Image: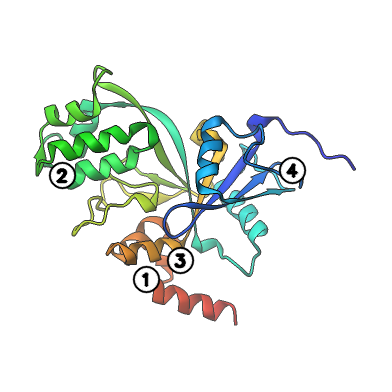
Amino acid sequence: MDSVSIPKDEIYKVCFLDSNGKPNRMIVFQGNLSQISKDDEIFSEEERLSLSIDQPEITSSIQQIHKDDSMRIIKKKIIKELGVHNISYDELYLFSKKHDELHLLKAFLEMTNQGKVEFTKHMAGQFLMNILDDNKINLAEELSKINLDTYTYDNFANIFDKESNGIAEYSFPLPLGRKFSHSRDLLFSANPFSILPTKENVYQPNNTNKLLTFDNNLLLNYGNIEHNTIFVCFANDVLNYAISNSISEEHVIELYFPLLKEKDILNLYHLKNYLRCIKI
């Protein structure tokens, strides 16, 4: 039976990140097992460049991911590809990227609680990590040049607003299946491998703007995600990253793996014991 050709804009790619946050595997959910290479037309020039640098293994799937799939369904499709004995539902965290406008004064006031909290070097660094891509690498250089303990709005605007008159467009990582109860927190790293290794965690959970689980959310609720790509992080890799960078294991479990936290799995040791038990 001939495979049905799927329009390019309806093909989703699932990219798996290793313990350094680098892509090491990609599965293209195209509805058939036709071979895929980095030069395939489904990839943009930007994607091809990234694939040439990172060189992840690229495979195809007979499954499809649809816009009206929930996060729960997407996770189950990923598990089916990987094998139910190789990964559990609780160990998966997903995010994507999305272009969005940022009103800089509004952002600054949100991060400083309307000016009541100082905007520190670590806050500036974490915010930068959350929006940083290859096109914005100059921002890191600007930040290192100023190198203040605290920043005023003018300092902030001089770094992040060169020509945009207070409104800039950035590529933001976007948590899939996790959502804030009130509004997006710009200091939260939707990409867990972007958490800065600081003495105190820059982002702190807040009871007035809780980070909640929404695995029944549909993919279409997130709008147009960048390059139709979903990034997958495994709990084991995120915890190893946390350990390597002196980041609290319990902190990353709380943020990215709430189902593990519900089982009182708060660190890598607990996780290994849990996985050993369920595989017996």
- Whichever of labels 3 and 4 marks the residue nearer the N terminus, that label is 4
The circle on residue 121 is 2
Q: What's the residue at 16%, 37% (across, down)?
A: 145
Q: Position of residue 163 (x, y in %)?
A: 26, 18
* Image quadrant where one finds the C terminus: bottom right
C-beta proximity under 8 Å, tags 2 and 1: no
Q: Position of residue 103 (x, y in %)?
A: 27, 25
Spatial CA span between label 2 and label 3: 30 Å
Give the class, few, some or many, for how many residues have Cα within 10 Å of label 4's Cα (few <14, many ≥20): some
Check disc 3 and report the residue beneath it.
236
Give the class, few, some or many, for how many residues have Cα within 10 Å of label 2's Cα (few <14, many ≥20): some
Give the class, few, some or many, for how many residues have Cα within 10 Å of label 1's Cα (few <14, many ≥20): many
Q: Residue furthest right?
A: 1
- Whichever of labels 4 and 2 marks the residue nearer the N terminus, that label is 4
Q: Which amino acid, mark 4?
A: Gly
Q: What's the residue at 46%, 76% (across, down)?
A: 272
Q: How many marks?
A: 4
Please name which of the two marks, 4 or 2, marks the residue nearer to the observer: 2
Q: What's the residue at 50%, 44% (across, down)?
A: 53
Q: Is residue 85 above or below residue 173?
A: below
Check disc 4 and report the residue beneath it.
31
